Amino acid sequence: MPDRRSRGFTRLLVPFLVVAAGVPATTAAAPATPSPAARLGDCSAGARALGEPGAIVYPDTGNGGYASVHTDVAIRYDEPSNAFLTGTHVLLSDRATQCLTSFSLDFERREPGTPNGPDLTVHRVLVNGVPSSYRFVQPTYPGDPKGQNDPDPRAHEISQDNPVGGPHDNPLPPACSPELTSGATRYRHSQDGQQCPANKLVITPRNPIPDGTAFTVRVDYTGRPGLHHDADGSNEGWFRVPGGISTVTEPVASEDWMPLNNFPTAKPTYNFLITTNAGKTAICNGKLVSVRQRGSTPEFPDGSATWHWSAPMPIPSYLVLTMVGDYKLTSRLGNDGLRYYEAYDTHIPGRQLKKNLPRMHQQPDITDFESRFNGPFPFSSDGVVSAAAVHGAFIEEMESMIVFNYGHVNLSTLYHENMHQWWGDNVTESGYNMTFFKEGMATLGQVLEIARQASGGADAAGISPASAFDKAMVTWFDKVYGAGGSFWTEAPSNPHPYDLFSGSATYQRPAAAYVALWQILGRTRFIATLHAIQRVYAGSSITESQLESQFGRFLPERTPACEQRLQRFFGQWFDTPYRGGGGSQRPHLTGPGLNGGGFYGGACPQP
């Protein structure tokens, strides 16, 4: 996601695709039969958070005790009233990683005091088809030694810092991040010490679920989906646009329209069945399988249509997409064999649309260009959607379907978001503190575009080191390296919620580190590193130490001195805040040909 401040094809007009047959059955894991060994005394409740002890960035999200395998999303949505109708449900196929007496999901039914927040009601929960009890509880800070039901109210408080502090001088870590409607930096401490909302849906099956067992969870719900207010004062979630809705949900707002295991490393595959008013278009991740038209019913007097999208690739929780509205959707097959989707909101003015479409058409070319660095495109489809301008929304790299919510499409941003399809989407951050890893890679995509234009569009894989392509990257680095301010004063790997998506430490600083690594390893070895990471961690997630280890494997000289110097390099670029913010207060290890102290020398001579 960008900073919040901020070929010939035959076209298929998708809305006229009608399937007479019924929509294919959804996929689900086989029901489990509890074994005699699954005695109550051998089992326990699954964790209600996946954050590390002491985490301050959305510590309330994620749920343990099981792995998310597949999710069927069935939504019956009336657009004029912005309401989920009876029959709306999710069917989660999971696998127990311990013997479970209970487990939890993330689901923000309501955001108190917010008129555009969700107002959702759960009607029924089934585990393996059997009705199960459920309740909503507050989160507890990760690692609480007193357990998830700690009776101390201070174990369930809001803050952006550890400890909470607040009016009661709470010495404990926060259990959740605040939901602010304005001025995140100015009002950073405004909710310290308040109680976290009860957004944990705790489910107790009739019988314990044995370790290693596949099981299904169905949650039926209705009501109004809505927006989540983040700790940086911005909005995310279910945005109303003229004639429909658009969803952008990073980092946590998927839970404002569906219950799920809401953590980046939870990456099930998906199947979507979106039933909505006739004449509306539904867009989701993956590929469109069918559109089935239906006649008048009491809920849809003017008829309805069910849109079936299939996404067989693992999708992080914050990249699940559903859009409904007056979108014109087209499909085209690229020369690379990928299915490319384009959609635009018909409410976008014609003059702006004429600017948007040529840029959207460049996505296949951008994908081919970025594949030279990252390796093969990881999915079977790619797409871009231009929604009408909506206040408070932003642009996001929804997996396989990039969403622009400003009413216009920017080419540099398209390079950024398309780069995310490899970095963040296919290989995902291990937690919120790793946001810099994928945002830096996406910003590197923009640097590569700058270099591409500077070299006249030359093939980056076949140019010499002294070419205009490399020189443009060096020029970009030197300019960024000379910058001051928050670029250096915040460590990329240690963000606060209020600056997770609003600081150069998340974007330009890690991108500059990648350019330095390009110089340290050399172009060929750097590209080989990216390919290797995509192979090893495809469909999964990566930690900071794993990322650094992969770059270390491709050092030209793997001597102890060079490896130790590379570790210092990562410590300076990723983990160190420089309070002075420039001059000597910045990383001194850079790379050959770059401003700064270089990298090679002494016990680590340049190869």
Image (cartoon, helix red, strand yellow):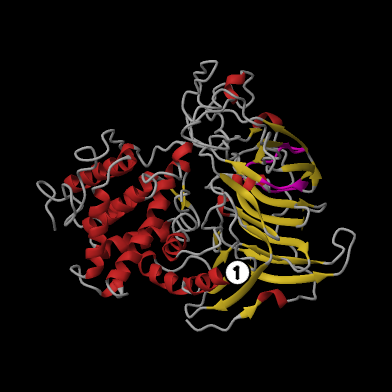
Label 1 crowd (10 A; few <14 / some 14-19 / many >=20): many
Identify which residue is drawn at 62% across, 35% down.
Answer: 46
On screen, residue 380 versus residue 566, left or right, reads right
Label 1 sits on residue? 343
What amino acid type should be assigned to the residue bearing mark 1?
Ala
- Confirm whether residue 102 shows in the render: no
On screen, residue 227 versus residue 567, left or right, reads right
Q: Position of residue 607 (x, y in %)?
A: 14, 58
Instruction: State yes or no: residue 213 in magenta.
Output: yes
Q: Position of residue 265 (x, y in %)?
A: 52, 47
User: Which structural element holds mark 1?
Assistant: strand
On screen, residue 417 versus residue 560, left or right, reads right
Q: Position of residue 224 (x, y in %)?
A: 74, 47
Quadrant position of residue 286: bottom right
Nearest the eye: 257 or 580: 580
- Confirm whether residue 541 shows in the render: yes
Nearest the eye: 546 or 32: 546
**Relative vertical location of residue 145 with respect to residue 74 in this rendering, above or below:** above
Residue segment shown in magenta? 203-226
Identify which residue is drawn at 47% across, 77% down.
Answer: 336
Identify the residue at the far left of this view: 602
Quadrant position of residue 130: top right
Instruction: State yes or no: residue 214 in magenta.
Output: yes
Identify which residue is drawn at 44% across, 50% down.
Answer: 3
